[in-house]
Image: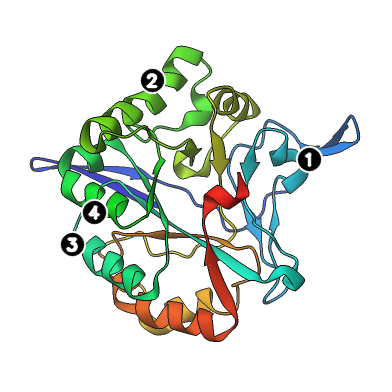
Amino acid sequence: MILVLKKGPILLALLCVAVLVAVPLMLTQNAGIASVSATVTNWGLSFQTAGQPPVGNATAEYLAQYNAHYLGETATEVGKKLYLTFDAGFENGNTEPILDTLKKHNVKACFFLVKNYLDTSPELVKRMVEEGHTIGNHTATHPDMSKIADRAAFEKELKSLEEAYAAITGQEMEKLYRPPQGKYSEQNLKMAQEMGYHTFFWSLAYVEWYVDDQPSREQAFDKLLPRIHPGAIVLLHSTSATNAAILDELLTKWESMGYTFGTLQELM
């Protein structure tokens, strides 16, 4: 993923490595709970069977120890639910049509935002909240959080966003956190948990974050339809013109496949 922060004529590009191919698992046993080595800091997925959840490079059991998630309920007998999320660091005109489509389908999403977005697009943030969407914490400055071991520095990244959100909405921010670039450490997961946060990774994403090199409609559907699965936490970018253009059709297709939409709060 690329997060571009626009500051005057300067474009600051932060390369967001959304690893969609799993790195080798390094499993240990801790009190009978499968866990993954803390040296693995890039969230990664391996899609092995169409229509089935991918394998993450950390297990759901390991993540659950720290109130962290990458999947929702996968048992189809209780229904096929999706959890729709959007990441954004800046606004480029695509969020309004996305919000219009979500409203049309009565779908509530979680928008993981950085402070730049709240500073520059407060009216859109207010609209998201008024229409029942959740604002998640994507940190203030979008750093590689796995490199932050200092508790005060870690807390500052999250609390700065909380303060900006409260100033805009007059409300306390809900405790949903997504690590920038999908980079994390076990220590990060512990610190977020101790701050009352649930950490959310994802189980479906595709390459649509290069704003000047957008996938075609066909390329998007080739990734998003075969790989959808019960319990999917879907990561999209609200800066993607392709996402804005196809979202109505995409949600209609997923609904025709028997999927409904839940909220991340249900997983907390």
Kind of element beneath mark 2? helix
Residue 184 quadrant: top right
Residue, disc 4: 127
Q: Could you tell which of marks 2 and 1 lies nearer the N-terminus?
A: 1
Q: Across the whole image, how many numbered discs are drawn on residues?
A: 4
Residue, disc 1: 26
Give the class, few, some or many, for how many residues have Cα within 10 Å of label 4's Cα (few <14, many ≥20). Answer: some
* Picture residue at 31% right of the left edge, 49% below the top: 129
The amino acid on which the numbered mark 1 sits, given as a three-letter code, is: Met
Mark toward the viewer: 2 or 1: 2
Mark toward the viewer: 1 or 3: 3
Please provide percent x and percent y for residue 186.
65, 29
Alpha carbon distance from label 1 to label 3: 42 Å
The amino acid on which the numbered mark 2 sits, given as a three-letter code, is: Lys
Q: Could you tell which of marks 2 and 4 lies nearer the N-terminus?
A: 4
Horizontal side of 243 relative to 72 (left or right) equals left
The amino acid on which the numbered mark 3 sits, given as a three-letter code, is: Gly
Residue 25 seen: no
Residue 159 quadrant: top left
Q: Could you tell which of marks 1 and 3 lies nearer the N-terminus?
A: 1
Disc on res. 156 = 2
* Picture residue at 8% right of the left edge, 43% below the top: 9
Residue, disc 3: 93
Kind of element beneath mark 1? loop
**In the image, is residue 69 above or below residue 166?**
below
* Picture residue at 41% right of the left edge, 28% below the top: 158
Alpha carbon distance from label 2 to label 1: 31 Å
Give the class, few, some or many, for how many residues have Cα within 10 Å of label 3's Cα (few <14, many ≥20). Answer: few
Disc on res. 237 = none
Horizontal side of 151 relative to 247 (left or right) equals right
